[in-house]
Image (spheres, helix red, strand yellow):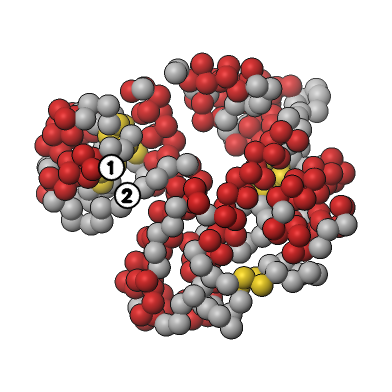
Amino acid sequence: MTPLDEIFKFISKGQIPPPGLFPEALLEGLALLSSFRARFSRLTPIERLLTTARHKTPDRVPCSPLVGGAYRRLVGAAFDRFSMDPDVAVQAGSIGARMIGGDLQLIGLDLSVEVSDFGQSIVYPENSTARPDYSRPLLHGWEDYRKVRRIDFHSAERMQKVLYLARQAVKAVGHDVVLAAVVSSPLSILGMMQSAEKMFKDCVVHPSEVMAAEEVITEVLIDYINGYRVHDLGREVPSMAFVRAVEKYRPKILALSAMMSTTMAYMKEIISQVKSRFPETVIMVGGAALDMHIAKRFGADGYAESAETCMEQTKKAIQRVM
């Protein structure tokens, strides 16, 4: 399916296609058109945010009300019900979006969603936002960081509630405002497994232990946000380990990174081996030692200059190959 087919698929369902499906030139053209129209008329929230994101001049500065759980008052729901019942959150958020306005509406239940699915005990007060039960911490000391285990977001109860909330919110107000889901950061999640104070101390005293836990949490969040399931092979991985991993997991995407030219030299052979046996696998490369020209010479399907551009470039590579 081409990007254009996917765009029409969303439109046929009465939904606004994700910006990532549009070619850069088209997004730039739409932003220029909106910026011109802003001189004479009022923009829609979607036009306003697109124009601003593309560094063009909108009719006014985009704004977003930071209301969160206070929306519950609009439907007479207590905090605990708002946190546990996504249908209540959708109803309250829809009313709030139309009452208060704004260009961007944040979607979420509360900041404890992800850490609760990792196993941290949560308290759900009636008149206050949900919070970790620090009398029953998941982690008791720096030795426990490596005990943090990967979870599958497909079976994570509260993450799935947020995804349901997002889908319902798109149906309810997706044509009126831009919707953005709230996801806790890896450090925030780790801090809620014991306390932020202890975690920040351990960042200084036991940085490698903290990083081990953060890598696990980050992988899960990438899955959660993008719908990808990630198998991290670690650092300094032997060449054949990549081929064996592709054979075992049969992933759609293989991502390789090299920080030094000495390790970069092995990438061409890995790409050749994988492509010869699994030609349907999309291979992305990145790292300080590479650039776009080297990536093409090695036979990779795509290149990402940084972690910030990785997901965008991966989606583009998939569209080209698939």
Reading the image, the residue beneath label 2 is 231
User: Which residue sits at x=48%, y=42%?
Assistant: 226
Looking at the picture, how far across and down is residue 307, in whole percent? 39, 47
Alpha carbons under labels 1 and 2: distance apart = 8 Å
Residue 312 placement: quadrant: top left
Relative placement, left or right, of 150 versus 13 is left
Query: Relative to residue 30, is residue 153 drawn left or right?
Result: left
Q: Amino acid at mark 1?
A: Tyr
Dividing the picture into quadrants, the one containing residue 316 is top left
Identified at 70% across, 69% down, the residue is 124
8 vs 44: above or below: above
Relative to the observer, which residue lies in front, 57 or 72? 72
For label 1, the SS is helix
Q: Write down the residue under mark 1.
A: 249
Type of amino acid under label 2: His
Above or below residue 246? Residue 76 is below
Look at the image and tell me whether residue 6 can be seen: yes
Position of residue 13 in the picture relative to residue 152 (left or right)? right
Query: Which disc, if any, is residue 317?
Result: none
Q: Are marks 1 and 2 in contact (CB under 8 Å)?
A: yes
